[in-house]
Image: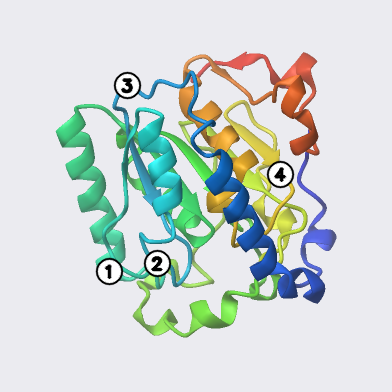
């Protein structure tokens, strides 16, 4: 099982430059692999029309999450983009817009939605859960630096800071704190070869409703990464009470480098 690294390790600055330089070709390769096998991933999955809201990363929009939403729809879920244009961070329009979109989705379906957030989208997803806990049944984040303590830990910080003047005061760097314990299951999917954010900042501390799933991959390709896609479908299909933590099947274990301890993490955790 992957545990959070020490504060000193996580404060070492951005990922190595070579990983950043290789982001684009790796993401393209991951997209090509995803395009080949994405029709096989939903096999034996039945989403039963359950709603899933997918939030894009920094400076991305719903086009970036389209491959993932197509996968979810094929698996029987009702996947929604956020319909708020480019993600420039926690502006008033985006925060109120997420509340409105989530409200429309849950009103239409008559049940809580699952939320998937990519990078900054995952951080906004955590904030959404904290504000609307009864409207979300689980949260899955992809390469989200939820526990970042220094802007140097992300290569996206300069771009994020360009829009800081438009962000709500409660979401300034000094005010926006790492997430606390949530009342819903929370899964962080991350990669130690992430070229954008320091991977240690993505790790949840241990908890009965928190887990970390490592995959081999880039940051920019996590939303259409075959192993991440499998893990997402598995986590969406899992019951929430009791909630079993992720254990990859033996035939796929090679794609999940930090395979959880079956004796401990496969045990179901109840929601208090």
- According to the picture, the residue beneath numbered tag 2 turns out to be 170
- Give how far across and how far down residue 241 sits, in percent: 47, 16
- According to the picture, the residue beneath numbered tag 1 turns out to be 92
Query: Which one is in front, 58 or 63?
Result: 63
Badge 1 density bin: few <14, some 14–19, many ≥20, Cα 10 Å: few
C-alpha gap between disc 1 and disc 2: 10 Å
Mark 4 or mark 2: which is in front? 4
Q: Earlier in the sequence, mark 1 or mark 3?
A: 3
Residue 118, visible in the rendered structure: yes
Q: Secondary structure at mark 4?
A: loop
- Give how far across and how far down residue 198 sits, in percent: 72, 63
Q: Secondary structure at mark 3?
A: loop
C-alpha gap between disc 3 and disc 2: 37 Å
Where, by quadrant of the figure, is residue 208 drawn? top right
Mark 1 or mark 2: which is in front? 1
Q: Earlier in the sequence, mark 1 or mark 4?
A: 1
The residue drawn where x is 45% and y is 46% is: 68
Residue 146, visible in the rendered structure: no
Q: Secondary structure at mark 1?
A: helix
Do labels 3 and 2 touch, CB within 8 Å?
no
State the mark number for residue 48.
Answer: 3
Q: Is residue 243 above or below residue 124?
A: above
């Amino acid at each position: 099982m992957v545990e959070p690294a020490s504060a000193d390790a996580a404060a070492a600055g951005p990922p190595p430059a070579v990983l950043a330089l290789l982001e684009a070709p790796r993401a393209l390769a991951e997209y090509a692999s995803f395009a080949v096998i994405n029709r096989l991933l939903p096999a034996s999955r039945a989403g039963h029309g359950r709603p899933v809201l997918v939030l894009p990363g920094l400076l991305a929009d719903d086009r970036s999450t389209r491959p993932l939403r197509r996968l979810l729809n094929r698996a029987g879920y009702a996947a929604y983009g956020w319909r708020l244009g480019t993600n420039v961070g926690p502006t008033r329009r985006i925060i109120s817009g997420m509340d409105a979109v989530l409200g429309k989705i849950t009103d239409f379906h008559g049940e809580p939605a699952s939320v998937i957030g990519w990078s900054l989208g995952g951080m906004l997803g955590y904030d959404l859960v904290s504000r609307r806990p009864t409207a979300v049944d689980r949260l899955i984040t992809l390469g989200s630096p939820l526990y970042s303590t220094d802007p140097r830990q992300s290569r996206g910080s300069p771009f994020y800071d360009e829009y800081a003047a438009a962000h709500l005061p409660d979401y300034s760097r000094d005010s926006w704190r790492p997430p606390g314990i949530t009342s819903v299951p929370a899964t962080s999917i991350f990669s130690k070869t992430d070229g954008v954010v320091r991977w240690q900042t993505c790790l949840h501390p241990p908890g009965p409703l928190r887990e970390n799933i490592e995959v081999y991959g880039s940051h920019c390709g996590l939303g259409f990464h075959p192993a991440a896609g499998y893990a997402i479908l598995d986590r969406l299909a899992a019951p929430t009470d009791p909630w079993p933590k992720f254990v990859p099947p033996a035939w796929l274990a090679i794609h999940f480098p930090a395979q959880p301890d079956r004796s401990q993490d496969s045990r179901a955790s109840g929601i208090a």
